[in-house]
Image (tube, coloured by chain):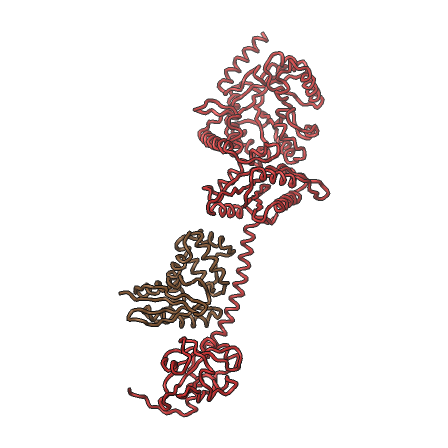
Chain colours: A brown, B red
Amino acid sequence: MYGMVNEGIRSFIEKNHGPETWTAICKKAGLERAEFERMSSYDDSVTYDLVGAICEHTELQAEEVLKVFGEYWIEFVSDSNFGNLLRLAGNTFVERVNGLDDMHERILLAMPHLKPPSFELEQVGEKSYHLFYYSDRAGLVPMVVGLLYGLAAKSGEKIEVTYITPKSPTSDHDVFEVTLLD
Amino acid sequence: MALYTFEFSKSMIDILCPMFLTVGAGGCIEQVGPTLSLIFTQEIQKKNFFEVFSVEKPRRVNDFERLKTRLGTKLVLTARPDGGDPIQFRSVATELHNSPGGLLLDLSFGTSLADAIKRFNLSGADFKPNDFSIDLFYTFETQRALLDDSQKMTDALTSAKEAAEREANLDSLTGIANRRSLYQQLEGMLHRPKDDIDLALLHIDLDKFKAINDTFGHAAGDEILKHTAKVMEAWAGPDDLPVRIGGDEFALVLDGPHDKTSLFSLAENLIANITTPVRIDGHSCKVGASIGIVRFRAGDALSSDRLLINSDMALYEAKGAANGVKLLTPEMIRLHEERATLVSEIEKGIAEGQFVPYFQPQIDTKASKVCGLEVLARWDNPAKGVLSPPSFLEAANRANLMREIDRQVRQQAINAFATCRRDGVQVGKLSLNVTASNLRSPDFLEDLQDELFLAGLSPRSIQLELLESILFDQSDKFLIAQCLSLKAAGFTLALDDFGTGHAAISTLIEAPISTLKIDRSFVTGLDSNKKMQRITGAMLAMARQMGVDVMAEGVETRRELDLLEANGCRFFQGFYFSRPMAMIDLRSWLELWEKGQMRKLS
């Protein structure tokens, strides 16, 4: 995982719980350093250990932590240098979800070790869509849910997300149903 | 639908779309642009499009009919042009109007740009002239160099930062953790979720370490500190933290369950190992050690500061324990709190000038006169009355307040004594007690001289009384030198409480002592103890032989006085003559004394 994600987690904890908590979480996660270089690649276990330590510290379930972080991630990216890439995709929730793969592809030019997830949106009703989520990483479904809510909030829309089909040995993706609310 | 109508020559198409390809209605590749021809090592014309390319995105586009439904949208294709690793292309497909059912696809390298240029040895001419991707390639190459440099700088800075952090947490002499690290460790342990595992802090202080420094030099002292650190490392478990707090103070944080028995056993083993003599430059150097222990648990509502104060309390008690080890008890905390209250009262007393001099006359019976006044500190406490030093000495010493009390009492005593002299009252010399820390203070002599000067007195009117124990360490050349400086400045020196300390006879020869004050323990009960009479007699004979005066302290009865006089003693101090008293009372006493002497004479 790129340091950008771990930096996002750091920013999230420091903003909500203060720098002392972040130091305590890093210690709990067995990390010697409490800072990350955004453009450097880190082992995925660092991120998973951080999430584990946050759960232990906050006594929250990993699903809750990841969902809240997913929402925050959109804020974090929007405020970063990559915010322009996110805006490039369009102004609506659907345009932005459709633009996620393009955005990741562009980022890949600068961050060649990135293993980004992939998202495909398929309209199944007037206001409902199926979102296909492809990722080599396990356990991040709740973060995707948070991320979708974050994207919708960013474009001033309201959505409802339901997780309908998990990834399995016969299917390389998870499926969510996303409904646009008035 | 209105159509643009253009006609392009092949060369024009090759310039505008060097990576184009056309697919016929049957799904086979028909024409290929020059750059694509260049990178594919095998001819791809007439091959099925999906034999050569796969469509990665959009997903599930795996035949020609589905491809036709994605016209005008971005396609991500992959192929293996040279049989090697796949190359990713971006593309867009449009209908071919002059070939019904056929498609025109225009490709670019997308994220594989840099790889493709290197792998297929492409040049600028292989791209369309207005293709920005070739510019991107140059940008990437430059950026890569910058990133490499930046990475090198980051690595260097990271290493430097890590080294600095390591150093900031380590004691540079011994290589074990330092005070900063100790605080971090304790805070970390205290902030863990609450549990019932007993953790412990061992607070270790070396005894007689200063003597090693003074006798064998600081390099030897350093070796002792390193030896101590090694012992602690050897006894520390993998999760424990050995620390040098500073000076000759160490700590061992035990991050694991320990019962009282195992803690004492560990502490005693540490002491046994620390106090093992160390061979340094042919000398056998040995220090003592004391250990105060405090137990705590994760989640305790304590600060690391409080833990250290608690362990210091236990350490203080350990210094008086036979095995040198004490575990903190509630009684120790209670005493500490009482002491803290007392210290606050003492500080208030200092601020309000409650510390005053009392004077006890010293009598020369041979000349029948007062030959001196010993100054004794008293605390004139508004609530508790006049208190003598045992009520405040220990607490004031621990709180480093004695220097200020001494100064306050001394200045008042000097001024009162000067007034006596100006009034023509003959009281001999003013006798002031001097501590080892007074002697070690570089300002002491100068301050004393200034105070005397302001009061219009000369050092010749002052006798300084040193405790015998101050001179115990005859190797303390500095103290001996200070005594010589005082003598040279005109002061006379007396050795107080003689017989109770351990001063070597050679020290008496070396130090410029003019009076020995025999301790009261050799005087009280003298009349009924023959053995004591012989010892006291021998001390007086020795002093006579050395040419120094002897003053007997604590004389309380006529019989004691007679016995001492019979052995040649002429200077006395004690309740038989007078208790210590305030100057106003002393003046009355002196008047009575003068009258008494006059009556005797007449």
| As drawn, B19 above or below B9 | above
| As drawn, B14 above or below B546 | below
Which image quadrant is residue B277 in? top right
**Residue at image coords 52%, 14%:** B591
Q: Nearer the viewer, residue B543 or A63?
A: A63
- Count every numbered label the image shows and give the total: 0
- Seen as rendered, the residue at the extreme left is A182
| As drawn, B580 above or below B469 | above
Asked whether residue B384 is in view, the answer is yes
Q: Is residue A102 left or right of residue B154?
A: left
Q: Nearer the viewer, residue A166 or A74?
A: A166
Q: Residue B109: percent from the left, percent from the top?
A: 46, 79
**Residue at image coords 52%, 68%:** B148
**Residue at image coords 52%, 66%:** B151
Q: Is residue B524 left or right of residue A160?
A: right
Task: Give the position of the C terminus of chain A as an image quadrant.
Answer: bottom left
**Residue at image coords 31%, 66%:** A179
- Seen as rendered, the residue at the extreme top is B602
| As drawn, B569 above or below B44 | above
Q: Residue A170: percent from the left, percent from the top?
A: 44, 70
Q: Nearer the viewer, residue B410 or A136?
A: A136
Which image quadrant is residue B560 in? top right
Q: Residue B74: percent from the left, percent from the top?
A: 39, 78
Q: Residue A148: percent from the left, percent from the top?
A: 36, 64
Asked whether residue B445 is in view, the answer is no
- Seen as rendered, the residue at the extreme front is A170
